[in-house]
Image (cartoon, rainbow, N blue to C red):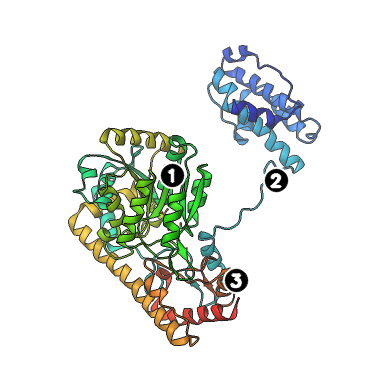
Amino acid sequence: MRKKKRRQSAIGNRQSAIPIPSVLSLLPLPSSAVFFFFVLARATQLHSSQMASAIPSLSSATAFTSRRPLLDNLKQANVKLGTPNQSTLLGKDHIRAKSFTRKSMTSAVEVSRFGDITMAPPDPILGVSEAFRADTHEMKLNLGVGAYRTEDLHPYVLNVVKKAENLMLERGENKEYLPIEGLAAFNKVTAELLLGAQNDVIQQQKIATVQGLSGTGSLRLAAALIERYFPGSKVLISSPTWGNHKNIFNDARVPWSEYRYYDPRTVGLDFHGMISDIKAAPEGSFVLLHGCAHNPTGIDPTPEQWESIADVIQEKNHIPFFDVAYQGFASGSLDTDASSVRLFAARGMELLVAQSYSKNLGLYAERIGAINVVCSSSDIAQRVKSQLKRLARPMYSNPPIHGARIVANVVGNSDLFNEWKEEMELMAGRIKSVRKKLYDSLSAKDNSGKDWSFVLKQIGMFSFTGLNNAQSENMTNKWHVYMTKDGRISLAGLSSAKCEYLADAIIDSYHNVS
Ligand code: KET
């Protein structure tokens, strides 16, 4: 029905209702030329007023007596030739034949079908890296995207990742399709890493785990599940939050609203605002929570506050939906950073958890993560999993294998697992040390009496500086420090050597730009 409508609008009101003679479908193969003649001639007739220059070539194409030149012509124009049965002739190929004629027409009259599409704005986070690359200043500093760099500010591939890749190469593994739900060994270890292997939820198989295209793809799959099975349900997201959350729910057509989270006066958590907004939301809403290292604020609830958040979510029959993109990266401990999720699971609550291995294993470009749905029984979990697979299949069919194998090898091998934990502590430790050095530099250089201790209190990769849009722009335009316009800086992209320079830039922007 929708297809039919689109077809009609594509050819406009002038379409003559010429039925394609069904007898064509019965003709032997060479007669497909007759059919394409028919299609081309019809299009020619439809657009004849605009196509003066295109007509000769089209009509000459139809005049070929042999089939070969016609095939070449159509091939060149991207027209797929198939068996001339009725479905291909009247289906996709029919549309393609028409788009071929249109392509020729547009080049002839310089009218684009895409002319009304406006330029999209650069992405507020990934766009920062593009701008950074274009800057040639020697002091430039990229604190935009949350990606770990070494003290020399080079990207870092973990040793355990290299070791796992060597193992994979030695084994000579194949590249066949994964099942829709992903690599079984990965799905097993990722759920165990999240909840602990001995967790009841795992022992009783109450969890549906599907490998996703990293954190983003896993969130998107969950959003599709919400859209399909909880139509009209709202997702509550923190204010502020990671910039892509809103895009994900918008594109999945899931309504969302914000709950208070950050209090600029205390540069801390607006706990009462958060609780009362979650309480006020319609019963049965989804509440999106950052499992640890809240992005962009770096402010997490305390364990006691997590208990109260769980209380109110339970009272209101809401469904907790965790985004865990920094497990191990906040505290340096995988278990500590999963404690919020485990606290909810221990209450027997149903919940969703999206996981990412971009940061903690440095697998940014491998696009490896998972969506987990903790259900009240294994039977329900199986059904949920089947529906997640059903949603994934038409979106991307099945996920990539390389990153899944790396994770399965690292987590599933006790030597590599222990080595990973050491490397993660090292990364988390380097971020903590530049955090401290930045705080020291700010305190030493700024004699206005401003309290910069919030830099020390925040955790994870980022510091939410409190700089406003104009001040953040000054950081970039005057100081060549690239950061997001909400005032967030990624400390994972900072070296000790650049702390003083960064402190100068922050102090200047804070005091001299309003
Ligand atoms: N959740 C959060 C909270 C998050 O910060 C990110 C990435 C993701 C999910 C998704 O990451 P993925 O690579 O899809 O697993 N954040 C950083 C990168 C980005 O914006 O894509 C960032 O905030 O810089």
Asked if the beta carbon under badge 2 is closer than 8 A to the nearest atom of ligand 1, the reply is: no
Q: Quadrant of residue 491?
A: bottom left
Is residue 5 shown to the viewer in this render?
Answer: yes
Q: Secondary structure at mark 2?
A: loop
Disc 2 marks which amino acid?
Answer: Gly
Which labelled disc corresponds to residue 428?
none
Q: Nearer the viewer, mark 1 or mark 3?
A: 1
Q: Report x, y in % for residue 4.
A: 62, 26
Residue at which label 1 appears = 285
Give the side of residue 381 with respect to residue 200, left or right: right
State the separation of the CA atoms marked 3 and 2. 33 Å
First of labels 1, 2 by sequence position: 2
Of the pair 176 and 73, the residue shown nearer to us: 176
User: Considering only order in the chain, which callout, 2 or 3, is on the residue closer to the N terminus?
Assistant: 2
Amino acid carrying label 1: it is: Ser
Q: Which mark is residue 470?
A: 3
Residue 485 appears at what percent x and percent y?
A: 55, 66
The spot of residue 311 in percent (x, y) is: 33, 51
